[in-house]
Image (cartoon, rainbow, N blue to C red):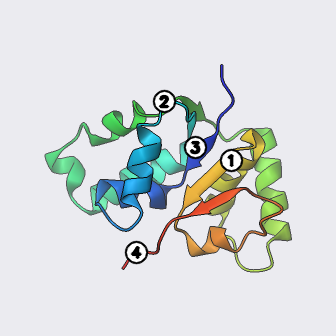
C-alpha cells in the first residue's frame, strides 16, 4: 500500500460538502490520483454528526458512504495515535481539544499533511505537524 500523503480534517470535508472557502482545494485532493488520502475515524464521526445536525443525512443518507469511498485508507485511533495525540496536546502552547489532537496525530503517525481550517490545529507548532491550512469559513 502506498504511503498516505494527505489527511483531511472534518473542517476540510465540511468546506467541500458545503462549498465554503477552500472547497476547491479539497476537491482537487479528492480527485488527485497521485494523492493517497487517509480518513481518520474521528473525522468520520464528526462529519456524520455535523451532517445530521444540518439535516443533510435525512435527505441524503448516502452522503457519508460517498465521501468514505473517496479515501484510500481508513485511519484508526490505535496506541501509536493515542501516544502521538498526547505529545501534540502536551507540546502545543494553546488549547488543543482531544478530538483535534487525535485527528492531527493520525496525520503525524502517517507522516502526512493534515489539511484543515481549524484554528485549534493551526496552533500546533509546524515542526510537530505538516499542515495545509485552508481559508477560514466566512
Task: Locate the N terminus by quadrant.
Answer: top right
Mark 1 vs mark 3: in front: 1
Query: Which residue is painted at 72% across and 56% down in the image?
Result: 130
Secondary structure at badge 3 equals: strand
The alpha-carbon separation of the residues under discs 2 and 1 comes to 19 Å
Q: Earlier in the sequence, mark 4 or mark 2?
A: 2
Residue 50 picture location, percent across and down: 36, 59
Residue 134 picture location, percent across and down: 50, 65
Residue 41 picture location, percent across and down: 55, 42
Foreground residue among 30 and 79: 30
Q: Which residue is mark 2?
A: 33
Number of numbered discs on residues: 4
Q: Which residue is mark 3?
A: 40
The alpha-carbon separation of the residues under discs 4 and 2 comes to 27 Å
Mark 3 vs mark 2: in front: 2
Mark 2 vs mark 1: in front: 2
Secondary structure at badge 4 equals: loop
Query: Which residue is painted at 56% across and 32% down in the image?
Result: 74
Task: Locate the C terminus by quadrant.
Answer: bottom left
Q: Which residue is mark 1?
A: 107
Foreground residue among 21 and 109: 21
Q: Earlier in the sequence, mark 2 or mark 1?
A: 2
Tell me if residue 87 comes above or below residue 137 in the rendering.
above
In the rendering, which numbered label is found on residue 29? none
Foreground residue among 95 and 137: 137
Answer with left or right where residue 7 lies relative to residue 130: left
Disc 1 vs disc 3: Cβ atoms closer than 8 Å? Answer: yes
* Mark 1 nearby-residue class (10 Å; few <14, some 14–19, many ≥20): many
Query: Which residue is painted at 60% across and 44% down in the image?
Result: 6
Amino acid at each position: 500500500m502506498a504511503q498516505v500523503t494527505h489527511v483531511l480534517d472534518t473542517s476540510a470535508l465540511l468546506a467541500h460538502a458545503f462549498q465554503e472557502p477552500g472547497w476547491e482545494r479539497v476537491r482537487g485532493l479528492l480527485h488527485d490520483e497521485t494523492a493517497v488520502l487517509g480518513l481518520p475515524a474521528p473525522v468520520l464521526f464528526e462529519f456524520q454528526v455535523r451532517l445530521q445536525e444540518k439535516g443533510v443525512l435525512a435527505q441524503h443518507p448516502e452522503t457519508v458512504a460517498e465521501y468514505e469511498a473517496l479515501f484510500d485508507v481508513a485511519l484508526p485511533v490505535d496506541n501509536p495515535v493515542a501516544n502521538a495525540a498526547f505529545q501534540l496536546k502536551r507540546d502545543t502552547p494553546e488549547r488543543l481539544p482531544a478530538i483535534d489532537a487525535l485527528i492531527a496525530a493520525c496525520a503525524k503517525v502517517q507522516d502526512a499533511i493534515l489539511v484543515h481550517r481549524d484554528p485549534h490545529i493551526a496552533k500546533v507548532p509546524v515542526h510537530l505537524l505538516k499542515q495545509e491550512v485552508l481559508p477560514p469559513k466566512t
